[in-house]
Image (spheres, helix red, strand yellow):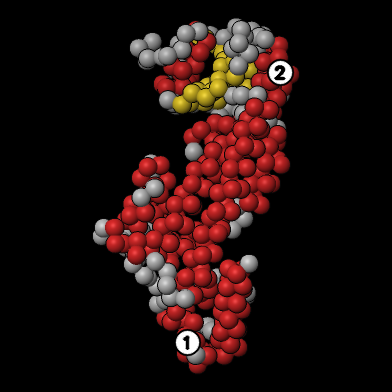
Amino acid sequence: MDPLLAMLSKVAPGTVLREALDNVLRAHTGALLVLGDSPEVLAICEGGFRIDVDLTTNNLYELAKMDGAIILTEDSRRILYANTQLVPDSTILSQETGIRHRTAERVARQTGKLVVAISQRRSVITLFAGSIRYALRDSSVTLNKANQALATLEKYKAVFDAALADLSALELENRAELGAVAVVLQRAARIRTILRELYRYTTELGTDGRLVTMQLQELTANFDSELDRLIRDYRQREVPTETVLHDLDVLSSDQLLDPVNVLRILGYTGGRNLVETVVQPRGYRLLAKIARLPSNVVDRLVDHFGSLSEVESASVESLDEVEGIGEVRARAIREGLGRLRERIFFEQRM
């Protein structure tokens, strides 16, 4: 999991720790917590006392009234030490000004553990872990941002679906150009950027973001599988799908605008003429749309015929030759492709 998401999930609304932190925040007492009792953490602890009790909102609230830090287990289920003084390496650079936050940053950098600092004066919860610093916002602010991101995602998803439908029609007419493939991948890369932002919001919101999570799941129900099959249809065989996704994610906005950059990620070489090159899809994506056709059978069809057009033009007898097909399934594939063709071209005319 992304380190920031891992941090946010531990203090998200709905967890006992977040409820306890909110109680301390409302009381304006301030607190400093370290999640983890590794040797690195214990080596910088001085004084205090070991209590080793379950974490409850009341326990943490009462212990936060004392000076010093509170040490929790890494899973934040138990409180191990209280009233402990933390003495991190003073040579570690810190951008913080207050003593509590400066200590928190140095402890996080020195130990790699999650450190939570609650400002008594500013009433802000700040998370530190390694070099990461993140100030928690009020749930209403995060929820508003999440809803804005959802609206943006819905628009981009509609554009992505339209580009994918256009590509499907071109594939069935044997007129698919790499430029059309690049357009779909450009839209997909934008969606993945928005999704990363939304995952952070929903993780931070915890139980407060249930409705956002439901809408997000509905909007992206088939997105990952469609994108995976699209990449498998067009990538050069020596380029793994995971590499394509990673390289798409790290393209800058300006780089993503150039379709040649996208096509090079798929393993194609050449200049501007690449976008006009007509290619044959292998057929993973459209064959997966045939009802009751298992993915392993789709793989065998692609391995045997090599392209969607070859599968579509194959006779029942030719399809029957593929391992695991049989005459009944061969006829079902033929009929399924016919229905798929009719539906795609009907939707194109709408």
Q: Is residue 277 left or right of residue 81?
A: left
The disc labelled 2 sits on which kind of residue? Asn
The residue furthest right is 58
Say which mark, if any, is on residue 133: none
The picture quadrant where one finds residue 295 is bottom right
The residue tagged with tag 1: helix, strand or loop?
A: loop
Given contact means CB atoms under 8 Å apart, are the residues at marks 1 and 2 in contact? no
Say which mark, if any, is on residue 314: 1
Vertical arrangement, residue 285 with respect to residue 301, above or below = above
Task: Tell me which residue sits at (54%, 84%) in the image.
Answer: 325
Q: Is residue 273 left or right of residue 114?
A: left
The disc labelled 1 sits on which kind of residue? Ala
Is residue 98 in view?
A: yes
Task: Tell me which residue sits at (67%, 10%) in the image.
Answer: 28
| Residue 73: x %, y % from top left | 58, 27
Q: Residues within 10 Å of mark 1 (few under 14, many from 20)?
A: some
The residue furthest bottom is 317
The picture quadrant where one finds residue 112 is top left
Vertical arrangement, residue 255 with respect to residue 309, above or below = above
CA separation, marks 1 and 2? 68 Å
Task: Tell me which residue sits at (53%, 55%) in the image.
Answer: 160
Vertical arrangement, residue 140 with respect to residue 210, above or below = above
> Quadrant location of the C terminus?
bottom right
Q: In terms of depth relative to the viewer, which is nearer, 203 or 99?
A: 203
Write down the residue under mark 2.
Answer: 23
Q: Residues within 10 Å of mark 2 (few under 14, many from 20)?
A: some
Q: Is residue 260 left or right of residue 241?
A: left
The residue tagged with tag 2: helix, strand or loop?
A: helix
Vertical arrangement, residue 74 with respect to residue 21, above or below = below
| Residue 301: x %, y % from top left | 47, 78
| Residue 135: x %, y % from top left | 55, 22
Q: Is residue 170 left or right of residue 221?
A: left
